[in-house]
Image (cartoon, rainbow, N blue to C red):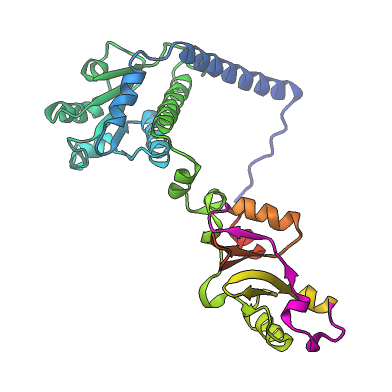
Amino acid sequence: MCASPVSHPTPEHRASSVTSAQRVLGIEADALRFMGENLPTDFADAVETILACKSRVIVSGIGKSGHIGRKIAATLASTGTPAYFVHATEASHGDLGMIGPDDVCILISNSGETSELRDIVYHTQRFTIPMIGISSNPDSTLMKAADHLLTLPKCPEACPIGLAPTTSTTLTLALGDALAVALMERRGFVASDFGVYHPGGKLGAQMRTVADFMHSGDALPLLDENAPMGDVVQKISTKGFGMCIMLKGDTVSGVITDGDLRRHMDGLMSRNAQDVATKNPLTVTTDCSAPEALALLNTRALTVLVVVDGDQKPVGVLHLHDLLRAGVV
C-alpha cells in the first residue's frame, strides 16, 4: 500500500489556516457572548421544570443536534440530574417506551422542523410530559409544541458557505452546559457528590478519600508500645509496610519504621518499642481527601500514613504507592 504524499504547505497556506481558525472562533465567541447577554426568556422556567421532575430528563435530536444532545444528557447525568439520550428514529420503533409521564423531554432541532422528532412530540402531548424545545426558529413546529422555548439567537454559522452546523451547535452545547450548572447550583451539588458519579480514572481518584485506599483489619501492623524489638522486627517484616504502629491501650502512641531500626542498630535487640518509636506520628482520618493525603506524604517525605478515627484509634494504613497506582496527583 502506497503512503500518501507528504504535504508541504507554503507560508501563505499556513497563514490562511490560522486566519480561518481565528475567524471561526471569533464568530462563535461573539455568538456565545450575544446569547449570554440575551438568554432565552424561558431559561429559568426550564430549570424549575427539570428540578420538579420526578424521573429523568430525556434528550433527543437527529444528526449534529443528536451528537450535542448526547453530550448534554451525559453532562446532566454526571452532575446530579438523571438524564438519558433517546434516538429519535429508534423512538418511533419502540423506544418511546423509555419516555414516561414523570419525565421531562428536551428536544433539539436547529430548524425546528425535524420530522424524526414528530413522534416524540406527539408522545409528550399524549401523556402530558413537559417538553423543552431548543431551536433557532421560534415559529417552528417544534417550538409551537414546546412548553418552554429555549430559542437560539440567529447568529451566522461559522462555515464559509453558511450551511454546516457550527455556531448553532456550539450555542446548543453551551446552553446545555448552562442548564446543567444552574441545576447543580440549585441542588447544592458539591465535589463529593461529583465523585459519586465519577469513580473511574484519574478524575475519580481525585475525588476519593483515604478510606477508599487504606489497608485495614488484619493487615494493620499493630503492637503494644512495650513490645520487645524482636516482635517489632517480625511485625514489620511480615506486614510489608516498612513500619509498625505502636499502641498505648487502643490508641496510637507512635510508629517504628525501617529507618528507625537502622538508626538504633547499636544495641537494638536489648531495647523495647518505646525506646525506638517516633512519638505522636502524623495521622489522618478516613474522610481526608486522597490528593490531600498525597500532599502530606510528599511534604513530609513519607511513604505511609496511619489512619485513625476520632479517638485516635488506628483504623487503617495508607501507602504512597496505592495513591500513585490509582492516578491520584
34 horizontally vs 143: left or right = right
Q: Position of residue 21 (x, y in %)?
A: 62, 22
111 horizontally vs 218: left or right = left
Q: Residue at x 28, y 24 (%)?
A: 132
The answer to whether residue 143 is above or below residue 87 is above
The answer to whether residue 5 is above or below residue 309 is above
Which residues lie in the magenta part? 264-289
Please indicate, yes or no, whether residue 285 appears anywhere in the rendered image: yes
Q: Residue 133 magenta-drawn?
A: no
In the foreground, 301 or 127: 301
Please indicate, yes or no, whether residue 111 appears anywhere in the rendered image: no
The answer to whether residue 58 is above or below residue 151 is below
Tally of marks: 0
Q: Residue 267 magenta-drawn?
A: yes
* Residue reaching furthest to the right: 266
Q: Residue at x 36, y 32 (%)?
A: 66
Q: Position of residue 74 (x, y in %)?
A: 40, 39
Q: Quadrant of residue 80?
A: top left
Q: Position of residue 106 (x, y in %)?
A: 30, 28
Q: Quadrant of residue 52?
A: top left
In the foreground, 96 or 99: 99
* Residue reaching furthest to the front: 249
The answer to whether residue 140 is above or below residue 75 is above
Q: Position of residue 298 (x, y in %)?
A: 73, 56
In the foreground, 238 or 314: 314
